[in-house]
């Protein structure tokens, strides 16, 4: 029985068992796809590392803002950061 799952190289709506005119077939095509994926791997690793660093930095900034607000409240000063700085921006705009 044929696999009903579309292959990663098939176009949307294309049947997975049909090869489009530009598709390569055979072991050489498989090697080429593997090489393409392996060539993209260093970029993926770099992006993952960058994302982890950015998320960590943002979490640390939230901790620092909370700490500053707590110190301001303790000393009777107004809060430096509004209490809603942690909320996600709403997708709906307030404009009519």
Image: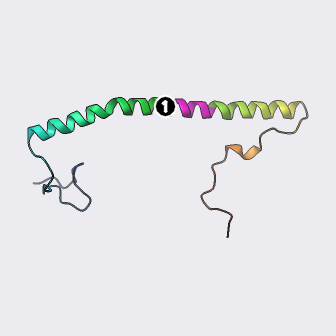
Q: Could you say which quadrant of the image residue 83 lies in? A: top right
Nearest the viewer among 41 and 87 is 41
Q: Residue furthest front?
A: 22
> From the viewer's perspective, is 13 left or right of 86?
left
At 21% from the left and 33% from the top, the residue drawn is 35
The crowding category of the residue bearing disc 1, from other C-alpha atoms within 10 Å (few below 14, some 14 to 19, many at least 20), is: few
Q: Number of callouts in the render?
A: 1
Bounds of the magenta span? Answer: 52-59
Magenta includes 57? yes
Q: Residue furthest right?
A: 76
Residue 33 % position (x, y): 20, 39
Q: Could you say which quadrant of the image residue 55 lies in? A: top right
Q: Residue furthest bottom?
A: 96
Q: Could you say which quadrant of the image residue 65 lies in? A: top right
Residue 44 % position (x, y): 38, 33
Nearest the viewer among 96 and 55 is 96
Residue 23 % position (x, y): 15, 50
Above or below 15: residue 83: above
Q: Quadrant of the C terminus?
A: bottom right
Element type at marker 1? Answer: helix
At 31% from the left and 34% from the top, the residue drawn is 40
> From the viewer's perspective, is 24 left or right of 81?
left
* Colour scheme in use: rainbow
Nearest the viewer among 22 and 10 is 22
Above or below 87: residue 79: above
**Residue placed under numbered mark 1 in the picture:** 50
At 57% from the left and 30% from the top, the residue drawn is 56
- Magenta segment, principal secondary structure? helix
Q: Quadrant of the N terminus?
A: bottom left
> From the viewer's perspective, is 23 left or right of 63?
left
Residue 32 % position (x, y): 17, 37
């Amino acid at each position: 029985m044929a696999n009903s799952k579309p292959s990663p190289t098939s176009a949307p709506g294309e049947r997975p068992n049909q090869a489009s005119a530009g598709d390569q077939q055979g072991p050489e095509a498989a090697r080429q796809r593997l090489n393409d994926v392996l060539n993209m791997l260093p970029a993926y690793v770099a992006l993952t590392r960058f994302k982890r660093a950015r998320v960590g930095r943002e979490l640390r900034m939230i901790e620092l803002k909370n700490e500053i607000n707590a110190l301001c409240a303790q000393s009777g000063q107004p809060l430096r950061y509004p209490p809603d700085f942690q909320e996600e921006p709403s997708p709906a705009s307030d404009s009519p």
